[in-house]
Structure formats: C-alpha cells, structure tokens
Image (cartoon, rainbow, N blue to C red):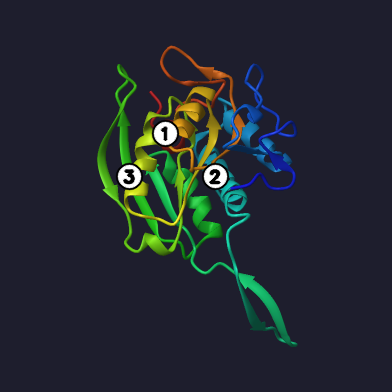
Amino acid sequence: MQPPPGSSSGPAAVPSAGAPAPGAFPGLVVPDHALLRHKLAALRDRETPSAAFRRLLAELGALLTAEATRDLPQEAVRVATPLAEAQARVLPAEPCLVAVLRAGLGLLEGARSVLPEAPVGHIGLVRDERTLQPSEYVVRLPPGLARRGAIVLDPMLATGGSAVAAVARVKAAGPAWVRFVCVVAAPEGVARLLAAHPDVPVLAASLDSGLDARGYIVPGLGDAGDRCFGTEG
C-alpha cells in the first residue's frame, strides 16, 4: 500500500505528542485527514459514553477502510446509466474483512458499510496480562481467499503480539495480500509487526507515544473492547 496523496508516513501526518514521526516506519501510513482527527479526538475522550464510542469506532472503521483500499487493482467495465453508457472501474473481488475479537468488531461494522459484499472472518485472541502474550481461542476464516486480499481490523496496535499472531493466521489461509488497519498504534507494536511481516502495510489513525508498564498505549483511548461494549470495571 503506497501512502496516498494527502496521506503519508512522512511529515504531513501528525503524531501524538512525544511519538516518533510516522516516517520512522516505512510500512506505516497515517492519513492526514481532518475528519479522522476530529473523530479520534472524541473517541479518546474518557467522557464519551459507550454508545457514542461504538458509533465513532464504526465511523473510523469506514474511513480507514476507504484509505486502506485506495490503491486496489480494478477492472474496466461499462455500465448503463439512465441516459447513456459510461466507462467505469470496479473491484474484481471485495477483500475479506477479518476482525480481531472482540474490539475489532467495532471497526468491522464501519468497514462493512463501505464493503458490503466482503466476506468476513474472525480471530479470537486474548492477551495474558502478566506476560502480555496472546493466546488463540477461535479462528473462523472464509474459503477462497486466494482470489482476494484480506484486511485485518483491530483498533489497538500495542505490543504487537496479537497483531503478529492474527496476521500469521490470515496469511496461512493464502490471501492475495494482507493489510492491517488500526485506530491507534504504539511504536513498539508497529516495529514488531513490520519486523515479523514486512510485506503487510499498517494503516493507523494515529501513531501514539508508546506503552505504559501494563502494555497499554499512551495516550491511547483506554480499553477499546470495554469501552465499545460497556464492560468497563
């Protein structure tokens, strides 16, 4: 995925205070988009209630998926408008959308709004809060991925352990390509994911400062799954 016009891993993208410039990671794209920044600000706000958080996460999922599919190959077709025939370009096959459970479901809702015919997969991973390592509890991927790509959806790219495991699982199904979409990313997670899967571009709404002692992204937005589904303690 090449950084699209107006989006970059270069100086146009604005990282969080204290974060490295996105250009430090050639495989990372942070779109320079006013609407992304606007919605991310509301998503970060600790006063945002669960229902609004869920809506914002879906909206960001739609915007980020549009960015992630900006340069996909297309086929030329002709369509009949009410007035005449027109030349057009279409995707030969919509990519598979793979949600990393459970927080990825929030992004999936928005992604499906712009790719309504996309097949959907789910990967369930839980992170051990002591070791910060992921363990897998469910994998459901659709057949026939060889003729289409896959977009892995997870709002948080923190330590990178879950992302590395999820991408490996998706790759094993043989898709034409894989891209990883998140809302906020820590430099540690980006570095780990790109080291393990240098062929997988990463698209994030923000590159944040780093991780705290618990492995949470700072400034981040809290626990995306808990905030999305109203299960905060």
Of callouts 3 and 1, the N-terminal one: 3
Foreground pick, 101 / 54: 101
Q: Could you say whether the residue bearing mark 1 is in a helix, strand or loop? A: helix
Position of residue 12 measured from the top left corner of the image (x, y, whole percent): 75, 34
Q: Which mark is residue 53?
A: none
- What residue is drawn where x is 40% and y is 61%? 119
As measured in the structure, the alpha-carbon distance from the residue carrying label 3 to the one carrying label 1 is: 13 Å
Crowd tier of the residue under label 2, counting other residues whose Cα lies within 10 Å: few below 14, some 14–19, many 20 or above: some
Kind of residue indicated by mark 3:
Arg
Would residue 32 be found to the left or right of residue 109 on screen? right
Looking at the picture, does residue 52 appear above or below residue 73? Answer: above
- Residue 101 in sight from this viewpoint: no
Mark 2 touching mark 3, by CB under 8 A? no
Q: Which mark is residue 55?
A: 2
In the image, which is nearer the foreground, mark 2 or mark 3? Answer: 3
Q: Which mark is residue 169?
A: 3
Kind of residue indicated by mark 1:
Ala
